[in-house]
Every structure is written in structure tokens, then in C-alpha cells.
Image: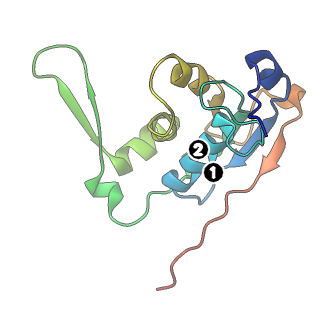
Amino acid sequence: MSTVFVSTEAARESSKWWVIDAAGVPVGRLATEAAHLIRGKHKATFTPNVDGGDFVVVVNADRVELTGGKKSTKLYRHHTGFIGSLKEVPGGEMLKNKPEEAIEQAVRGMLPEGILGHRLLGKLKVYKGTEHPHQAQSPEAFVVSFQRKKK
């Protein structure tokens, strides 16, 4: 039995569009499902070095959640490029001001580094509200399954 590898062109032909509703979903759970779809790991033709995944549209990014004490303890860091200019933003403030960026950073961390990872990140579209301009691609709904711990 021989292994069959899919070409890049053949993998791109079978790409679909998915819509994920982020309302009430933890950032990490959302990011793992989105990265899984973008990478194409749910397909039988998955090849690690080929961009064979699907496009993912995330709506209601402003209603995503951070679990536990991450709103106060998690820090989003970036450097401006100037000496001593490391900026830190707490998780709660980041979700309030730039929820799209928080989701993009979480998904970026789950994708491979390099050219392939940059190309795959272009397949992620994140929007604050319920409206998005990708209706013409007729995206299918994808439900993120997660269980809350009972207190």
C-alpha cells in the first residue's frame, strides 16, 4: 500500500468556508477548532506541508470569553521596536478593546511557523458582530463543542 500525497492545486479545490459563532465560547477552545479547520486536519487528504485547509469566519468576537482568572492574569505582549517599549495588556482589557486580535493571536500560536503559517492565517476572518461580507461563499455553520465545569 503506497502513500498518496495531494498536490497544492488539488487541495485548494476542495476548500470550504465555515462560520463559527464565538458567543460564550472560551478563546482557547475556539482557537483549537479554528486552527484544526484552517490546517485541514479534518480531511482524509491532510498533508503537513500543503495548504489544504478551509476558510474560517469567526463572528461575535466581542462575546468570546476567558475562563478562570485569565482576565486579570493573562498578559498580551508586543514590542514597538523602540528600546524599553514592551507593551503589556491584560486579557480582560484586550477582549474589551480588540477581541479580534486576541482570537487571531490564539490561532496564530496553533499554526506552523514560516511561510505556510502566514498563508494559513490569511484564511481566518474575525468580526466583532454577527455580520460578515462572506455570504457569497455560502459558508456552513460550525459549532464549537465544549463542556462547562459545574460549580
Residue drawn 86% across the image and 28% down it: 137
Residue drawn 49% across the image and 53% down it: 28
Q: Which residue lies furthest to the front in this view?
A: 1
What's the mark number on residue 1? none
Q: How many numbered marks appear? A: 2
Alpha carbon distance from label 1 to label 2: 6 Å
Q: Please tell me which residue lies in front, 125 or 31.
A: 31
Check the image and report above or below for 97 versus 151: above
Check the image and report above or below for 129 versus 114: below
Say left or right for 25 vs 89.
Answer: right
Q: Where is residue 129 in the image (x, y as percent from the top left)?
A: 66, 41
Q: Where is residue 151 in the image (x, y as percent from the top left)?
A: 46, 86
Residue drawn 55% across the image and 46% down it: 31
Residue to which mark 2 is pinned: 61
Marks 1/2 in contact by CB < 8 Å: the verdict is yes
Quadrant into which the N terminus falls: top right
Residue to which mark 1 is pinned: 22
